[in-house]
Amino acid sequence: MKIAICSPEVFPFAKTGGLADVAGALPKALSKLKVETVVVMPLYKAVDRQKWGLVNTKKKVSAKMDDRDVESVIWEGKLPGDVKVYFIENQGYYGRDHLYMTAKGDDPDNAERFIYLSKIIPEVLKAVSFRPDVVHVNDWQTGLVPLYLREYPGDPFFSETGTLFTVHNIGYQGVFWAYDWHFTGLDWEYFTPESLEFYGKINIMKAGLIYSDIINTVSKTYSKEIQTPEFGYGLDGVLRKRAANLYGIVNGIDYEEWNPETDKNIYENYGIGDIRGKRANKKVLQEELKLATGTKPLFGLIARLADQKGLDILAGAIDDMLKLGVQMAVLGTGDEKYHKLLSGIAKKRPKQVSVTLGFDAKLANRIYAGSDLFLMPSRYEPCGLGQLISFRYGTIPLVRKTGGLADTVKNYSPSTGRGNGFVFTDYSSKALLRAVKSALGVYEDRKAWNKLVAGVMAEDHSWDHSAGEYVKLYKKAADKARRKSKAA
């Protein structure tokens, strides 16, 4: 099969969140399965052309925006696994220091920038002579691609091309005022509740949900949750209509990138055969963060500091947690109220709580390696990568049962020895505190705890399995497109 993966961000070139990790790791895993894959993304200013060996192909493509033909140049690079990446160079749209937003908020021309991205992607594929069996698009920034491909009925290049649309977080939909409609180039017949209209505005994600052949999201539980009013953010009805074509595949992680045996960012390498190095990492992490050294259980928290990540229920439980003697290493940024709350607690209890506002990739690895438990009390979590990385480093996740956390973390039972973490269901501070107490009870039994650590490190959450599941969906999308083509 030939697959084109289109994403607004791809690791290691440009990243704001987990989408980039998926878009960077999945092609590499597909190449191991002998699936011919290319990646298409914008050439942001942040992409280091020299570092990644990018080459200007000198090929130019254009798409009409209103009465203008807006031209871009195609650059070429590679991901591991010899996967070609085609970068769209357009200084006006993507030559900025950021991807989507600044400290002041979203770029005011994001509708124009990413409508253009959806328009230009098919032109790029034609220019490089890559005729895909499936175009795999990700999140709202590429949501119009399935609709634009559908508008190429007379172009044999895409006559049998299927489309897969992946929802990474339905909370971000690309909703813009109706005055941006002229950028789409579509007739007003598409501006209806059955198509792209959404309470008087344009909803670009709706295009991906309605016009793609197959839809998937990043865990089985989340695929069910987003069909409910509580988690569907106004699109649950659309998703229920397409339930027969909606699937859930849990993300994997790159086991070469996340490997405590070779990780250069941690203090001492270790593996499943000898976890003494993990204890050494904890000691030095405590020293670096100026926490009290010793055997007190250390919780790591690496997250956006916002309600969605469970910071509101953590705020109601943290004092009682600290009274139990635990330590916390927090890394992240988000809402100002949580900056003040956590920084204030760290100031009062500097030997128990460390707070680093911002993001430091090297420190993140050291927290994964040095912590005993990893905290994810999320209100909702489409997939979550933190728990998968923590498994790899022998750090036990404590999570709320939602989305991908429900699919990957099973509550540990001391009586049977089964389970790989600690799980609570009710979204409340009391439920979180009960789970913490359960975890501490097991932590005191060093033999049981060491067995639990070794067990989670032996699990396989790499992309190998998930990539195979994506191949199955690609086949469904391609078959669907071929049937449509023959029926036309």
Image: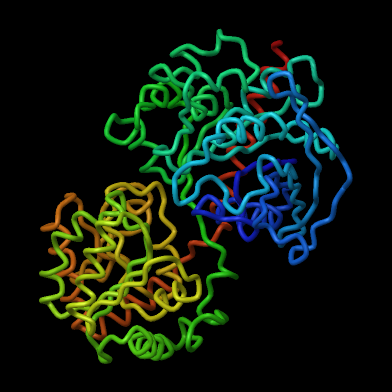
Q: Position of residue 277 (x, y in %)?
A: 43, 89
Residue found at x 89% / y 45%: 58
Q: Position of residue 155 (x, y in %)?
A: 80, 19
Drawn side of residue 328 relative to residue 180, left or right: left
Residue situated in front as seen by the camera: 190 or 245: 190
Give the quarter of the figure containing the C terminus. Answer: top right
Residue found at x 39% / y 78%: 454
Quadrant of the rendered image containing residue 481: top right
Drawn side of residue 377 relative to residue 171, left or right: left
Residue found at x 78% / y 55%: 77
Drawn side of residue 250 relative to residue 399, left or right: right
In the displayed image of the protein, which residue is found farthest to the front?
A: 104
Vertically, is 478 above or below 100?
A: above
Residue situated in front as seen by the camera: 48 or 206: 48
In the displayed image of the protein, which residue is found farthest to the top?
A: 189
Q: Position of residue 362 (x, y in %)?
A: 50, 75
In the displayed image of the protein, which residue is found farthest to the right?
A: 58
| Colour mapping used in the image | rainbow
Drawn side of residue 279 relative to residue 244, left or right: left
Quadrant of the rendered image containing residue 340: bottom left
Quadrant of the rendered image containing residue 320: bottom left
